[in-house]
Image: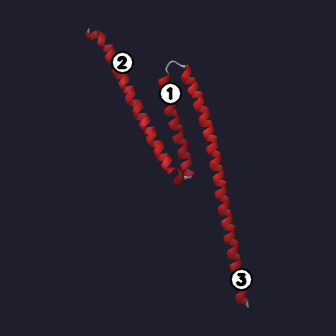
Amino acid sequence: MYYTISAISFWAFNIGFNFRFQLSVLGCLIYRFQLSVLGSLIYKFRLSVLGHLILVLAFSSWTFIYWFRLFVLGYLIYRFRLSVMAATSHWALDRFRLQYLLKLWVLAVISLGIEMEIDSNLDTIRKSAPESQ
């Protein structure tokens, strides 16, 4: 009789503990999902507002291409920093996106550096051209 009562109480405790554990895991997953969806909506909205403002400023200036490059580079850096922050909590989900954004960021920096080097070489050629004539 004693063993039966202890076995029943042990199983009742296990079932209750497992149920509480499952509920806490489920609640944690739902909470994290809601937070990630909310965070995604907030930073997408902020990015779109920021992008519209920078594009309006870029279109209103004479040096549209320069401002557009700066906007793209800043956008990639901002997204990269956001992905790093998100990756600390959701590393498995954001690993692919993080690698993709990192590659885009590196390519943007390299292409901007190459174009700046070409521009500076063209400026030196233009400056030295009148001297040779």
Identified by mark 1, the residue type is: Phe
- In which image quadrant can residue 52 be found? top right
| Residue 76 point in image, percent of width and height | 50, 37
- Name the element at disc 3: helix
- The residue that mark 2 highlights is 123
Q: Which residue is at a point 62% across and 49% down the rendered structure image?
A: 36
Which quadrant is the C terminus positioned in?
Answer: top left
| Residue 65 point in image, percent of width and height | 47, 24
Mark 2 residue crowding within 10 angstroms, few (<14) / some (14–19) / many (20+) = few
Residue 27 drawn above or below residue 128? below
Mark 1 residue crowding within 10 angstroms, few (<14) / some (14–19) / many (20+) = some
- Name the element at disc 2: helix
**In this rendering, the label closer to the viewer, 3 or 1:** 1
Considering every residue shown, the one lying at the far bottom of the view is 1
Q: CA distance from mark 3 to mark 2?
A: 87 Å
Q: Earlier in the sequence, mark 3 or mark 1?
A: 3
- Name the element at disc 1: helix
- The residue that mark 3 highlights is 8
Considering every residue shown, the one lying at the far left of the view is 132
| Residue 21 point in image, percent of width and height | 66, 67
Q: Earlier in the sequence, mark 3 or mark 2?
A: 3
- The residue that mark 1 highlights is 68
Identified by mark 2, the residue type is: Asp
- In which image quadrant can residue 112 be found? top left
| Residue 125 point in image, percent of width and height | 31, 17
**In this rendering, the label closer to the viewer, 1 or 2:** 1
Q: Earlier in the sequence, mark 1 or mark 2?
A: 1
Residue 133 drawn above or below residue 100? above
Residue 16 drawn above or below residue 75? below
